Amino acid sequence: MGEVVRFKKPKLADKARGKTLCKRGFHKWLVDKERQFDVKQGRLVTVYRCSRCGALKTLAH
């Protein structure tokens, strides 16, 4: 017979770490420097990306 391996069940707090803040609107916005010019509008824009969930927010100048 083989040995019985007990799997460790993840806690809910560990499973949802970093996601609950973004769901409630508290994103951690960082400037994304790859795309600074919008081709369709033809002007400079600032693109913000959330470091936790990857959501995008744009601000036109």
Image (cartoon, rainbow, N blue to C red):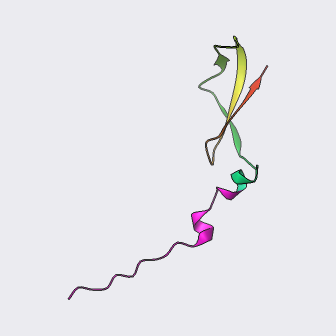
Judge left or right: residue 3 versus residue 56.
left
Q: Nearer the viewer, residue 30 or 19?
A: 19
Residue drawn at x 63%, y 13% is 39
Task: Give yes or no for residue 5 being in the magenta stretch.
Answer: yes
Q: Nearer the viewer, residue 32 or 59?
A: 59
Q: Quadrant of residue 15?
A: bottom right
Task: Give yes or no for residue 26 being in the magenta stretch.
Answer: no
Magenta residues, dominant SS class: loop
Q: Quadrant of the N terminus?
A: bottom left
Q: Quadrant of residue 14?
A: bottom right
Q: Relative to 31, does residue 54 appear above or below in the rendering?
A: below
Most extreme residue toward the left, as rendered? 1
Residue drawn at x 63%, y 44% is 51
Residue drawn at x 23%, y 85% is 2
Q: Which residues are magenta?
A: 1-20
- Where residue 54 sits in the image (x, y, percent)? 61, 42
Residue drawn at x 66%, y 17% is 38
Most extreme residue toward the right, as rendered? 61
